[in-house]
Image (tube, helix red, strand yellow):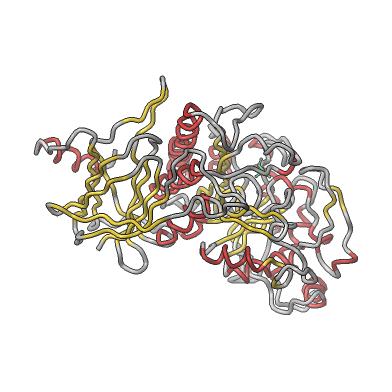
Amino acid sequence: MNIIKKTILAMSLASGAAFAAGEVSVTIDAAKPGPVINKNVYGQFAEHLGTGIYEGMWVGPNSKQPNTKGWRNDVLGALKELHVPLVRWPGGCFADEYHWREGIGPRNKRPVKVNTMWGGVEENNAVGTHEFFDLAELLGAETYVNGNLGTGSNQEMAEWLEYMTSPSKSTLAELRRKNGRDKPFKVDYFAVGNEAWGCGGQMTPEHYANLYKTAAEFLKAPHGQSPKFIASGGNDNDTKWTEVLSANVKHKMDAISFHYYTIPTGKWEVKGAATGFAEGEWISTMKNTMRMDELIKNNVAILDKNDPSKKVGFYVDEWGTWYDVEKGTNSGFLYQQNSLRDAVVAALNFNIFHNYADRVKMTNIAQMVNVLQAMILTDKDKMLLTPTYHAYRMYVPFQDATSLPVSMSGNGQYSVGSVSVPQVSASAARGKDGKVYLALVNTNPKEAADVSVNVAGAKAGVARGQLLTADAMDAHNTFAKPQAVKPVPFEAKASNGKLQVKLPAKAVVVVAVE
Ligand code: AHR
C-alpha cells in the first residue's frame, strides 16, 4: 500500500467513517497527480491470423466493399472512434515466419505462402509493409513492427528497417520509392522476435538475450528516426525473462514485452466457452484476469532493481481472453464471441494498467478484429461492435491522462464457492481536457454496489458519462442484433460533498466529474 492509500485508510478508520453495509467508499486525490497514462496502453494488435486482417479489415482496393486503399471503410470508421493510438503488426507467432520482401511490390506478383502458424491457409502477402503503414496512417496510429528473429536474420531485420526509414538514395530506399513511397515510413517501435520461449524459437532467456544484443547492434535508423526497440519477454508467472534481459542488456532495449492471456478454466486444453457459461466460469475469469496485477508487480519489482532510473518499459503487448474457438470455425483462426464478460475483463485490466503507468507504457489487446478478444467482428460485408469495443470507447479519456491516486474502503468480496474477488475496481485520472475521470467496475453479476466517491482537491457536484451492462453475463452482439449490448448515458449526483454512485451488477461505468 502506498503512503497516500495508507493515510487515507488510517483517516477513515480513525474518524470511524460510517459506511452503510455494502457501501464502498472511494477517494480520488486530485491534488496528487501521478504519472501520465501513455495513450499506447490502449494499443491494438493485428496479426496475419484467421480473418483478423484479410476479410476483417483488408478487402483490397478493387473490392465492391467500400474501402480506402484496400482497408474497409466501415471498420476504419469504427476504429477511428477508439482513437487507436498504436497497431502492432504482423504478429505474434506469425512474425517469426514473416519475410518482409515477400510483401512489397505489385500485389499480383507477391508469393503465395502457407500460413503454417495459423490454420494452414494461403497467405498471399497482399498486406505487406506499405499496406500496414497505410492502415496506421488512416487511423492516425503509431506503428509497432515486429521483426523476424526465428526464421529471419539480423541482416533481414536491418534491411527492413533501412527500407522503411531511410531518406537516402540507397538501393533499398529507392526500392521503397519504386513501390510508391517516397517519404520514409515512421516506425515508432520495432521488436526483435516474439515469444522466443515458444513459437519464436524455444529459446532460453540467456540465449535470447545474447541474440537480442547482437541483432539490436545492427538495427539502425537515421538520426532522430530510431524506433524504440523491444525485447521479447516472458509470459504468465515466468519472471526469468525480465530478470535476465534487464540484468544483461544495457544497450538499445527500450522495453521488455510480456504476454498474459485470461483463460476461464486456467487450462489451455479446455479453456471454456465464450458464451453460455455458468457463474463459476464468470468468477474464475475475473479471478484469472485480475492476476495481471500481481504479474506486473512481480516483473516491475525486478525492473526497479535492475533499472532504477526506469529507462526500460514493461509492455504487455499481448493480453485478453482466450476461449475455446466457436464451433464450426477453423481452430487455427481463434475466432470467438465477445460478451459483456469481456468488457468487464477489459476494464479491470485498464484499471490495473493505470496503476503501473510509469512502467507499463504500452499494451496491445489480442486482437483488433475477428481474433480472440476482438473490438469488431465481421461476417462478409457486415460488421458489429463487441462489448470490448465499447469498453475501449468509454476509456478513451484515459489516453494520455494523468493518473490520480485512488483509495478504497468497505469494498467487499464477491464469492462463488471458494473463489473470491474484490467486488469493485476503480481508477481515476485527469484527462487532457482538465476534467477528472472515474472508472468503476462491478465484478458481481448479481448485486449492485453503492459507491460513495470523495474527490479530494476538486469540485464534485455531478458525474456524467456512460454505463455498460446487460441482463445476462454472456450478453453479446450478433449480426441479427448488433446493438444488444451498448453503453447508455449515466449520471450520479453528490450529496454531502460525495458522489453517490449506484453501480449496477456486472457493469462498467466511466464518468467525468464536474
Ligand atoms: O495472439 C495469438 C498468439 O498468441 C500470438 O501469435 C502469439 O504471440 C501468442 O501465443
What's the residue at 79%, 57% (across, down)? 156
Give the camera-side residue of 146 and 442.
Answer: 442
Seen as rendered, the residue at the extreme left is 15
Give the camera-side residue of 111 and 416.
Answer: 416
- Residue 92 appears left or right of 435: right
Count of all numbered marks drawn on residues in the image: 0
- The quadrant where residue 411 appears: top left
Q: x, y (%) of residue 493?
A: 22, 56
- The quadrant where residue 413 appears: top left
- The quadrant where residue 13 appears: top left
State whether residue 294 is above or below residue 96.
above
- Residue 231 appears left or right of 412: right
- Residue 181 appears left or right of 45: right
**Quadrant occupied by the C terminus:** bottom left
- Residue 363 appears left or right of 381: left
What's the residue at 45%, 42% (across, down)? 300
